[in-house]
Image (cartoon, rainbow, N blue to C red):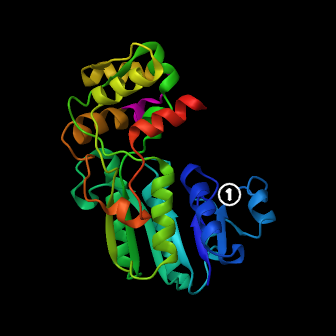
């Protein structure tokens, strides 16, 4: 039996693999990747590489073995991810994996915004498969904001989220939660609503960034069409800009990404990383 991570060289997957290597011997970890050369450093550390591509479903027929515990990290391809995920689910069922863990979105079936549609469809496909499952319903990543700090320092923080609160946490916290459910018993057929301990508004985020950086940073709430124009003007593809605007308007502004279950802190055994620390870390880089 192996613990198998799909998308193992991606932003979240690489953190999960690192966490697994701290928790279990390397020969118990398998990484599903598209590019063996990119994953060569993992192979050098004793991780088994299994080559498969979301866009080539047949490649997953050899990706899993009987008894594996599999982490399906959601594809980044919004609009295409549901058929990609179904190919993984079908292969996992055919192989007889022991459990399929999936990284979905906060709120699960109650997440009423466009970004959640593929995740809801994936959860239902997993339930329909009859596989033993665990759903990790991830909230917003702190990096969604801190990665934009250079732009924010120059132009401020802009959005259409109003006073909606965001229960964000860094990817590393979510990765630690995944490691816990992959390596421990007792998570079968359970779902977890994962979010940071302390939610914040974008105005509070901007104020904290201003305090730490010494720059004059404020939050400007703009109409959705204005936000879309800003995003596309910065090079964001039109369809993805629509998704990001909808997250602000249909999710954050309505409190759907506020979280507050405490599941993430319980799974990782410590308080989640506050946005103030994520800002500090980003400014130090």
Quadrant in which the C terminus is drawn: top right
Q: 44 left or right of 126? A: right
Magenta stretch encompasses residue 144: no
According to the picture, the residue beneath numbered tag 1 turns out to be 34
Above-or-below relation of 31 to 118: below
- Decide if residue 145 is in sight here: yes
What percent of the width, then of the height, locates residue 267?
40, 66
What percent of the width, then of the height, locates residue 7?
59, 58
**Location of residue 40 by image quarter:** bottom right
Residue at the image point whose x is 44% and y is 25% from the top = 212
- Decide if residue 57 is in sight here: no
Above-or-below relation of 185 to 201: below
Q: 158 left or right of 285? A: left
Q: In what element is the residue under mark 1?
A: loop
163 or 55, nearer to the observer: 163
Bin the neighbour count of mark 1 within 10 Å (Cα to Cα): few under 14, some 14-19, many 20 and up: many
Range of the magenta residues? 234-241
Residue at the image point whose x is 23% and y is 47% from the top = 256
What percent of the width, then of the height, locates residue 170?
46, 47
**Location of residue 26 by image quarter:** bottom right
Magenta stretch encompasses residue 239: yes
Residue at the image point whose x is 50% and y is 61% from the top = 176
Quadrant in which the N terminus is drawn: bottom right
What percent of the width, then of the height, locates residue 129?
39, 78
């Amino acid at each position: 039996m192996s613990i198998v991570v799909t998308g193992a060289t991606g932003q979240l997957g690489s953190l999960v693999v690192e966490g697994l290597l701290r928790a279990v011997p390397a020969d118990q970890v398998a990484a599903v990747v598209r590019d063996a050369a990119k994953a060569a450093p993992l192979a050098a550390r004793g991780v088994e590489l299994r080559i498969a591509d979301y866009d080539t479903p047949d490649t997953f027929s050899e990706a899993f073995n009987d008894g594996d515990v599999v982490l399906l990290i959601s594809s980044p391809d919004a609009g295409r991810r549901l058929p990609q995920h179904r190919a993984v689910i079908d292969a996992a069922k055919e192989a007889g994996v022991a459990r399929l863990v999936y990284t979905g979105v906060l709120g699960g079936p109650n997440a009423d915004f466009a970004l959640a549609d593929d995740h809801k469809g994936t959860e239902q496909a997993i339930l329909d498969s009859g596989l033993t499952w665990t759903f990790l319903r991830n909230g917003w990543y702190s990096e969604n904001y801190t990665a934009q700090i250079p732009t924010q320092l120059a132009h401020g923080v802009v959005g259409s989220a109003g006073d909606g609160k965001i229960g964000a946490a860094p990817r590393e916290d979510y990765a630690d939660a995944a490691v816990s459910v992959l390596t421990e018993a007792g998570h079968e057929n359970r779902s977890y609503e994962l979010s940071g301990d302390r939610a914040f508004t974008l105005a509070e985020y901007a104020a904290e960034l201003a305090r730490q950086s010494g720059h004059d940073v404020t939050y400007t709430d703009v109409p959705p069409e204005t936000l879309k124009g800003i995003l596309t003007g910065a090079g964001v593809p039109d369809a993805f800009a629509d998704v990001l605007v909808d997250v602000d308007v249909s999710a954050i502004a309505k409190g759907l990404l506020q979280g507050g279950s405490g599941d993430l802190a319980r799974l990782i055994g410590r308080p989640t990383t506050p946005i103030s620390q994520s800002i500090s870390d980003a400014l130090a880089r």
